[in-house]
Amino acid sequence: MTDITSLKGIGEKTAGALSRLGISCVEELVTFYPRDYEEFPAPTEIYKLIPGTVGTVECVLGSPVSINRYNGMVIANVYISDMGGRLQISWYNMPYIRSSLKQGEHYVFRGRVYEKNGRRIMSQPKIYRAEDYKKGYQGRLMPVYRLCKGVNNRLIMKTAAEALRTPEALKLTEEFLPRNMIAENHLMAEPEAVRAMHFPKSREELFNARNRLSFDEFLLFMLLKRQRRELYQGQSSSYRCRPDIRILKLAAELPFELTKDQSSAFKDISRDLSSGKVMNRLLEGDVGSGKTIVAFLAMIYAGLCGYQSVIMAPTEVLARQHYESLTALLEGRGLGLKAVFLCGSMTRAEKEEAYSLIREQRAQLIIGTHALFQENVEYKSLGLVVTDEQHRFGVSQRETMKRKGGLPHMLLMSATPIPRTLSMILYGDMDVSVIKERPEGRLPIKNTVVGPEYRRNAYKFIYDEIKKGHRAYIVCPAIEREDEEEALEASGLGGDGAELCTVEEQAEKLRKLFPKEVRIGTLHGRMKAQEKEAAMAAFKEGLTDILISTTVIEVGVDVPEATVMMIENAERFGLSQLHQLRGRVGRGDAQSYCIMINTSRTEEAAERLGIIRASNDGFFIASEDLRLRGPGDLFGVRQSGELGFMVADIYRDETFLHLAEKAAEELMLKDAALSEPEHEGIARRLSAYMERSFYDV
Ligand code: ADP
Ligand code: MG
């Protein structure tokens, strides 16, 4: 690993900022692929501009720029026209525009278009000399990266270009597949693909690059799956559970009756645990189907049989919630089991305490984040590992555990809807239990998609719900204004740009708008762990009525009293993400509602949100999402990276999934040990892939 500061122009300060994006070495920068691309099309006629989208026009400037003052703002306006129409172009607080734009010069303007009282306005466009645009931009794709405070798009572009020229990059992107595999699958060369991901010369080149890297990811995944299978197949278990009447009693005494699917999933698991073989099982069920209680029962069962078990969640918020509900479940039952919580943000002393509880097996049920598998944690007899909402538990970690004290039983929980055919490929080595039906008495969530003018009504509606003793979430895409401005810089992408809702601004606004007795809390990723915890606890206990938050609540959070989910700038979220967010309500007996505010006026946004409105079925939504995105989609990967793919998208790139599966099979027939010289590259990649920490969240 080569420190990022070895690159030209990267000092300590920039390095610090980059580390927040998970980039600390040259290698990480090379594989920090863009989240999207901006395309620079040929300029169009004015009548072809679509309000709500970014458009590109060209003109020879015929009239001078006029400067107006309005509400303390300086607005520079210029009017252009062609055969088909007239367009107003405006810049705010940029008075110098007047002297920089020259009459008689040939320009290209590129910016977002709006319609106001029948007039077309392009606001804050970028300005190019026509010649420059045509030579340097037109037809190109510019990478758009994930950003954070102190890191703008230009910086990443520059340093990525720099990084690609280093010897480290050459080594990292070396071709590693045998020639015949490349030829058979019509793959682009590896180094070329990595470069083209950052700086594609054309759409076609980008697609080829993406296909190549998807193939790589799928191939490694398949090889890993095979190792996982070998690790498990027929393995006898050191943690065999004996029948225990207490677990049946507990299952019968829950505050609710298990659904048929929950019962049968738990039966599957009990059978596995007592079979004498190691369990390797996937528990699949849509959001809100009630997977958690099944996992808890499995953990308690293992505990009663004298074994420790852990449940690992992707966020601290979710882990903390699991800890609390499991503790509540144990309370007063006299089972003699103790739960302990462990996460990265705990103090040293707290951690030490947890470590010793675990080491001495004074705690049997262990709940936490990836911190659960850091070096200092020593289990006495870890019999069961449950991962919630993430599949990033690496084979090499499992092997370590196998060496240490015997391979524990494995239970994966997932809400990602995967069609059967794909599931066979991705999880072919595992047994699967599915929870289809929801707990009885659940009313389907009522959905609505509305424009921003409906907000007032929504607030009134939320107020009425609160008066009934219910609670509401309001989700915003950004924390504070600055984030988004940086994110939009150089991209002009993402929603309409017109009205972006941020957690901070919403909170300030709503605290004024709602009557005093309505208590409003906020929650976002930049808060300290304790603050997050306090905010979540307050909402859970009903000390706050409205929780304004970013998508940190997307996975797992369970507050049954919450009946309203209001999503601001809903058009900015992927459909699967919206479905997950919506899954935070409808978890109790009361009727729940999801209000999506669509601030975009594009047809595409309306159509996409229409799908979410029309259906509460995660499966249907995932397939419609794919249909809408189509094979030309540049975005992809909207399944929140659960499977650990950086580039590949199991739906979009299904063809390559099949090709990779076939290639993996052939490879294994030929050289299962990967010992032939031409497979050395694959062997190296595979071991790097296995070593890579799977706990990073
Ligand atoms: P998910 O599958 O999304 O993880 P959870 O396990 O969080 O769902 O369950 C959602 C909610 O439903 C929780 O509040 C849980 O207590 C409740 N629940 C689970 N099973 C049942 C049941 N059989 N009857 C009633 N409520 C249930
Ligand atoms: Mg869950």
Image (spheres, rainbow, N blue to C red):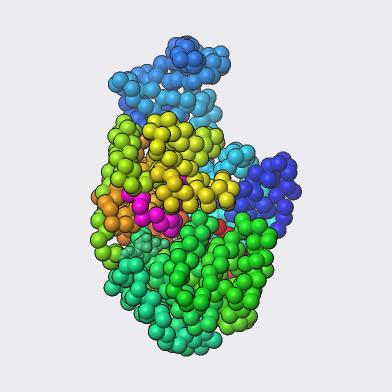
Q: Which residue is nearer to you in this view: 243 or 689?
A: 243
Quadrant of the displayed image that contains ligand 2: bottom left
Q: Quadrant of residue 348?
A: bottom right
The image quadrant where one finds the C terminus is bottom right
Q: Residue at point 49% right, 16% down? A: 73
Q: Is residue 500 above or below residue 589?
A: above
- 29 magenta-colored: no
Q: Which residue is nearer to you in this view: 203 or 343?
A: 343
Q: Is residue 344 above or below residue 493?
A: below
Q: Residue at point 49% right, 86% down? A: 240
Q: Is residue 86 above or below residue 356?
A: above
The image quadrant where one finds the N terminus is bottom right
- 553 magenta-colored: yes
Q: Residue at point 40% right, 68% down? A: 293
Classify residue 286 as left or right of residue 71: left
Residue 112 pos. (x, y %): 42, 30
Q: Residue at point 52% right, 49% down? A: 534
Q: Which residue is nearer to you in this view: 559 or 627?
A: 559
Q: Is residue 96 visible?
A: yes
Q: Is residue 38 visible?
A: no
Q: Quadrant of residue 671?
A: bottom right
Magenta stretch in the rendered image: 547-563
Residue 590 pos. (x, y %): 28, 53
